[in-house]
Amino acid sequence: MARIYTISLLILLTLTGCQSYFGKKDRLNYQIMLQNSRVIMLSSNTENQLKVFAKMTYLNDVDNISYNNREYFFLEIFNDDEDVILPDSMQISMFDKEPLWIRKIDDDELAYDDVMVRDNPLSTCYLLAFKRQPPRLQKNMKVKLAISGFSPNIFDFSYIVLNTKL
């Protein structure tokens, strides 16, 4: 009986020790995550005024893991037009440079992650990495998103995030 109890306890400790790639819930500060997120809308120039909504979160300030000299962003895009094919039709840049890579995040990955949280179940999510910028440029970080057929818009991460305890 004690052996079964010990094995069960080991399995339980192993499962509760699992965490996402970006962080554990008990150390994740949702206020910081919200302060490091920006939302934009892109509108088309067509007569029926199609819209694309996008939210981007700067992950480097959200969790304190090593980011290997890169700037990481989580991008969520809601698009209600089936003619807009993502990511083929989108161009993303920061300081006029394209990301090192863009990777689509699958639903099963989002289900087990605490930081990459999708707000809309119909949206598509991506993880982006840019080359790490020097501190003087980090104060002026702006990520431009352009999608074919829509006016481009900018995620402005340049304004100061105040550290508060609400």
Image: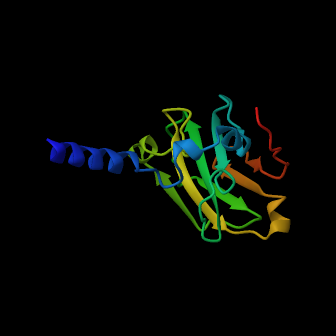
Residue located 71% across and 46% down the image: 36
Picture mark count: 0
Q: Position of residue 66 (x, y in %)?
A: 60, 65
**Quarter-wise, where is residue 40 in the image?**
top right
Residue 87 higher or lower than 111, as above or below: below
**Quarter-wise, where is residue 26 in the image?**
top right
Location of the N terminus by quadrant is top left
Q: Position of residue 2 (x, y in %)?
A: 18, 44
Residue 159 higher or lower than 135, as above or below: above
- Would you say residue 86 is visible in this rendering? no
Q: Which residue is more in the foreground, 57 or 92?
A: 57
Residue located 45% across and 50% down the image: 19
Q: Position of residue 156 (x, y in %)?
A: 79, 49
Which residue, as the protein is rendered here, is positioned at the far top?
48
In the figure, is residue 130 to the left or right of 14?
Answer: right
Residue located 85% across and 48% down the image: 159
Q: Which residue is more in the foreground, 76 or 147?
A: 76
Which residue, as the protein is rendered here, is positioned at the far front?
2
Q: Position of residue 20 (x, y in %)?
A: 46, 51
Location of the C terminus by quadrant is top right
- Would you say residue 120 is visible in this rendering? yes
Colour scheme of the rendered structure: rainbow
Residue located 63% across and 49% down the image: 148
In the figure, is residue 52 to the left or right of 13?
Answer: right
Which residue, as the protein is rendered here, is positioned at the far left?
1
In the figure, is residue 81 to the left or right of 60?
Answer: left
